[in-house]
């Protein structure tokens, strides 16, 4: 049988691939920037052309039939190969500038102060950093031309290559001025809810009080009622409030170490806690030589940072 991939057939396959990955016509439509009805109709046309169903349509989700699962796997492998090839071809061979998407607080507090060392080590390589923390998947990275990213999260990237290069320690921090005004902070039970400063979106999908809740749990203590503490959408903003003497922030070591070293912030209660999240280097395909240099440099800087962290902050201990 002579089957040619006509424009119509390619459109049907693209809609089916998105629907199969998301298990939803609505989510597929959002990804493809078309209507839900258009996605549903294109999948229906593909089924009619094949003369067999590809989905069982239930009230809650689309469930692929065995033939649908088979086609979904073949399509994803084919599209991945095409996307990977296009991503590598898109950048001219002579280009040596790497563009890195990075979690904003990490970019400001940890990465940017170290870039001078990177440029001295790799004087022929340019590096552009832009701060953002949206969820990544292969389709978005290819569509937006993102070659690599650094994210602080749980590292769940089923269709991307994600490598943890730095774990994170959590410890409450406050300014010397705040501690002078509240000299009786000796145990977790001494922490009042209205003193606590929260990063309400520690990572995409995290609970509002994720880091403080995790810290109290690891300390074997009961947290105070959450109502009353200030909330921010970036850890850097909560730390700024702590530096201004407004309360106690949950410090991430990567973001507070220099302030602790300079005496602007003081770690409380003598023990760090290992965060559930970590910093991952995320790519959708084989990184360019310039981005490989960035990855290698990040790994080396992380090792040096861990050595300094162990010297300046209370160690992580078992609960």
Image (cartoon, rainbow, N blue to C red):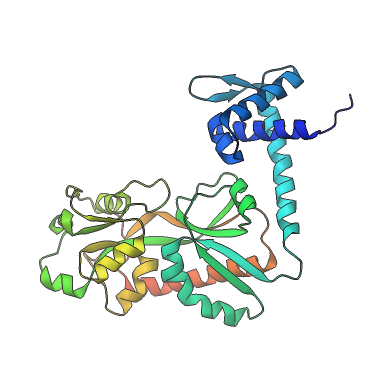
Q: Which residue is located at x 67 percent, y 22 percent? A: 44
Looking at the image, which residue sits at the far right? 2
Q: Position of residue 115 (x, y in %)?
A: 52, 76
Looking at the image, which residue sits at the far top? 51
Q: Position of residue 49 (x, y in %)?
A: 76, 21
Q: Position of residue 167 (x, y in %)?
A: 43, 60
Of residue 273 and residue 250, the one placed in the foreground of this image is: 250
Q: Is residue 56 left or right of residue 87?
A: left
Q: Is residue 44 left or right of residue 186?
A: right
Q: Quadrant of the N terminus?
A: top right
Of residue 221 and residue 91, the one placed in the foreground of this image is: 91
Quadrant assignment, res 267: bottom left
Of residue 199 and residue 252, the one placed in the foreground of this image is: 199
- Residue 43 appearing in the image: yes
Q: Position of residue 290 (x, y in %)?
A: 66, 69
Q: Is residue 17 above or below residue 57?
A: below
Number of disc labels: 0
Quadrant assignment, res 278: bottom left
Q: Is residue 270 left or right of residue 200?
A: left
Q: Which residue is located at x 63 percent, y 78 percent? A: 122
- Residue 24 appearing in the image: no
Q: Which residue is located at x 60 percent, y 36 percent? A: 34
Q: Which residue is located at x 89 percent, y 27 percent? A: 2
Quadrant assignment, res 219: bottom left
Q: Is residue 169 left or right of residue 32?
A: left
Q: Is residue 115 above or below residue 198?
A: below
């Amino acid at each position: 049988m002579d089957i040619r991939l006509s424009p119509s057939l390619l459109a049907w396959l693209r809609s089916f691939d998105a629907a199969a990955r998301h298990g939803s016509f609505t989510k597929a439509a959002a990804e493809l920037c078309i209507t839900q009805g258009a996605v549903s109709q294109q999948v229906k046309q593909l089924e009619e052309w094949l003369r067999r169903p590809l989905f069982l349509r239930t009230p809650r989700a689309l469930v692929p039939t065995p033939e649908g699962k088979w086609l979904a796997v073949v399509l994803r492998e084919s599209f991945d190969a095409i996307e990977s090839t296009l991503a590598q071809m898109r950048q001219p061979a002579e280009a040596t500038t790497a563009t890195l998407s990075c979690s904003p607080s990490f970019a400001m507090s940890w990465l940017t102060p170290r870039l001078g060392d990177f440029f001295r080590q790799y004087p022929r390589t340019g590096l552009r950093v832009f701060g953002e923390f949206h969820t990544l998947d292969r389709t978005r990275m290819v569509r937006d031309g993102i070659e690599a990213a650094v994210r602080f999260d749980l590292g769940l990237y089923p269709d991307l290559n994600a490598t943890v290069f730095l774990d994170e320690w959590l410890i409450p921090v406050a300014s010397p001025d705040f501690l002078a005004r509240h000299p009786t902070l000796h145990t977790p039970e001494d922490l009042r809810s209205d003193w606590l400063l929260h990063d309400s979106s520690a990572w995409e999908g995290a609970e509002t009080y994720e880091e403080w809740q995790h810290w109290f749990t690891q300390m074997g203590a009961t947290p105070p009622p959450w109502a009353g503490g200030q909330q921010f959408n970036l850890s850097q903003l909560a730390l700024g409030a702590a530096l201004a003497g407004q309360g106690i922030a949950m410090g991430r070591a990567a973001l507070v170490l220099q302030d602790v070293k300079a005496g602007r912030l003081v770690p409380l209660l003598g023990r760090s806690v290992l965060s559930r999240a970590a910093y991952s280097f995320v790519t959708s395909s084989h990184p360019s030589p310039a981005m490989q240099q960035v990855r290698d440099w990040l790994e080396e800087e992380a090792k040096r940072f861990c050595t300094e962290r162990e010297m300046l902050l209370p160690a992580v201990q078992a609960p």
